[in-house]
């Protein structure tokens, strides 16, 4: 994570995802449209979007990575006394 963007205090610089949509194009590529609010934007009306084209392999890799992250987030919500 050393190559991630950070501010002068060492905190991650990020945008908040407002919504997303996916599609298939030319029966060959996945499309992901991310609508996001810029970093530190307090206005819900301020948003931008980014459209990305992914190969089948990239779609699967991204999906697997996101599932791993979701599992870690979910596990962190379980009280330690209930974990195995």
Image (cartoon, rainbow, N blue to C red):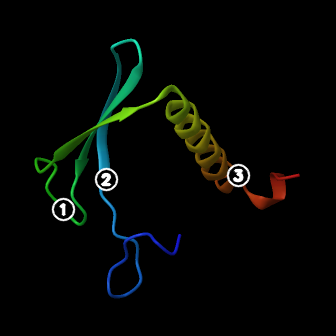
Q: Is residue 45 above or below residue 57?
A: below
The residue tagged 2 is: 16
Answer whether labels 1 and 2 touch (C-beta < 8 Å): yes
Answer whether labels 3 and 1 touch (C-beta < 8 Å): no
Q: Which of the 4 image quarters holds residue 9?
A: bottom left
Residue at the (46%, 72%) spot, across then down: 3
Question: How many neighbours does mark 2 have within 10 angstroms: few (below 14), some (14-19), or many (20 or more)?
Answer: some
Residue lying farthest to the right in this orientation: 84
Left or right of 83 in this view: 19: left
Which element is circle 3 on?
A: loop
- N-term mark: 3 or 1: 1
The residue tagged 3 is: 78
Q: Which of the 4 image quarters holds residue 43?
A: bottom left
Q: Marks 2 and 3, how far apart in space?
A: 24 Å
Residue placed most toward the observer, 5 or 20: 5
Which element is circle 2 on?
A: strand
Q: Marks 3 and 1, how far apart in space?
A: 31 Å
The residue tagged 1 is: 41
Question: How many neighbours does mark 3 have within 10 angstroms: few (below 14), some (14-19), or many (20 or more)?
Answer: few
Which x, y percent locates residue 6?
37, 76
Query: Is label 3 or label 1 in front?
Result: 1
Give the label on residue 23, or none: none
Q: Marks 1 and 2, how far apart in space?
A: 9 Å
Left or right of 52 in this view: 46: left
Which x, y percent locates residue 5?
37, 71
């Amino acid at each position: 994570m050393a190559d991630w963007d950070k501010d002068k205090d060492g905190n991650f610089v990020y945008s908040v995802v407002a919504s997303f949509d996916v599609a298939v194009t030319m029966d060959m590529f996945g499309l992901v449209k991310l609508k996001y609010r810029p970093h530190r934007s307090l206005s819900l009306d301020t948003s931008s979007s980014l459209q990305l084209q992914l190969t089948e392999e990239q779609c699967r890799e991204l999906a697997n990575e996101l599932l791993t992250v979701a599992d870690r987030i979910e596990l962190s919500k379980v009280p330690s006394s209930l974990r195995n």
